């Protein structure tokens, strides 16, 4: 009896330890996600405020904001269909590769926006930065537009196939000519006599 109590006590201790570890990990993930969301919201608000500034610093903020918006909307579009479409999963992996370059440019723009007090130097770098941002943004936009076209085309094809099926069924339902009933076959008189 004592052994059973010890086993139950040991199992209770192990299960409690496992439960505590899982709860701690879940809380850590939630805190990390919340911290990332808050950091992103603060960064977006800062960019929105700085993009209203005139001059090169405002232009850099507008470039960062435009780049982020393009990549965020492209990622959302591709992720929405990636579960059911392998081509969109492949496009999402291409976007991930492109996102590495976008993050590098965003970090460079952030460093210039925060650490470059010389407006003339910043203004001299703007044409090259605009060109890089435009290339990355255009590539992300092309992926998004292609994904939207693919979804629309798939939906149009599905609706057209369904419409054809409905036309066939409606035609069958409207076919109200009575189908001729076959007369029951009569048995020859010899067979009828044999039954009696």
Image (cartoon, rainbow, N blue to C red):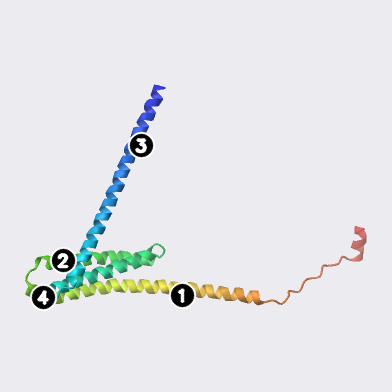
Residue under label 1: 156
Q: CA distance from mark 3 to mark 2?
A: 48 Å
In front: 61, or 131? 61
Tell me which numbered mark, 1 or 3, is placed earlier along the sequence. 3
Front label number (2 vs 1): 2
Residue in view at x 31 percent, y 66 percent: 75
Above or below, 29 relative to 125: above
Tell me which numbered mark, 2 or 4, is placed earlier along the sequence. 2
Q: Secondary structure at mark 4?
A: helix
Q: CA distance from mark 3 to mark 4?
A: 62 Å
Residue under label 4: 123
Q: CA distance from mark 2 to mark 4?
A: 15 Å
Residue 110 is labelled as: 2
Q: Residues within 10 Å of mark 2 (few under 14, many from 20)?
A: some
Q: Secondary structure at mark 3?
A: helix
In front: 126, or 190? 126
Residue in view at x 30 percent, y 41 percent: 21
Is 41 left, or right, of 89 in this rendering?
A: left
- Circles 4 and 1: CB distance less than 8 Å? no
Residue 105: image quadrant is bottom left
Q: CA distance from mark 4 to mark 1?
A: 48 Å
Tell me which numbered mark, 2 or 1, is placed earlier along the sequence. 2
Q: Residue 53: x, y in percent?
A: 15, 73
Q: Residues within 10 Å of mark 3 (few under 14, many from 20)?
A: few
Residue under label 3: 15
Q: CA distance from mark 1 to mark 3?
A: 54 Å
């Amino acid at each position: 009896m004592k052994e059973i109590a010890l086993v139950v006590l040991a199992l209770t201790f192990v299960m409690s330890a496992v439960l505590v570890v899982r709860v701690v990990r879940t809380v850590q993930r939630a805190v990390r996600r919340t911290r990332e969301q808050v950091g992103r919201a603060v960064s977006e608000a800062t960019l929105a405020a700085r993009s209203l500034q005139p001059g090169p610093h405002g232009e850099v903020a507008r470039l960062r904001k435009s780049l982020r918006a393009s990549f965020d909307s492209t990622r959302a579009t591709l992720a929405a269909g990636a579960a059911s479409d392998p081509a969109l999963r492949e496009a999402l992996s291409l976007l991930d590769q492109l996102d590495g370059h976008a993050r590098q440019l965003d970090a460079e723009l952030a460093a210039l926006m925060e650490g470059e007090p010389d407006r003339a130097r910043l203004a001299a770098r703007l044409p090259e930065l605009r060109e890089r941002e435009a290339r990355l943004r255009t590539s992300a936009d092309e992926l998004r537009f292609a994904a939207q076209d693919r979804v629309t085309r798939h939906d149009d094809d599905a609706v057209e196939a369904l419409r054809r099926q409905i036309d066939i069924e409606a035609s069958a339902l409207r076919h109200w000519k009575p189908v001729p009933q076959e007369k029951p076959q009569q048995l020859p008189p010899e067979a009828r006599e044999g039954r009696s």
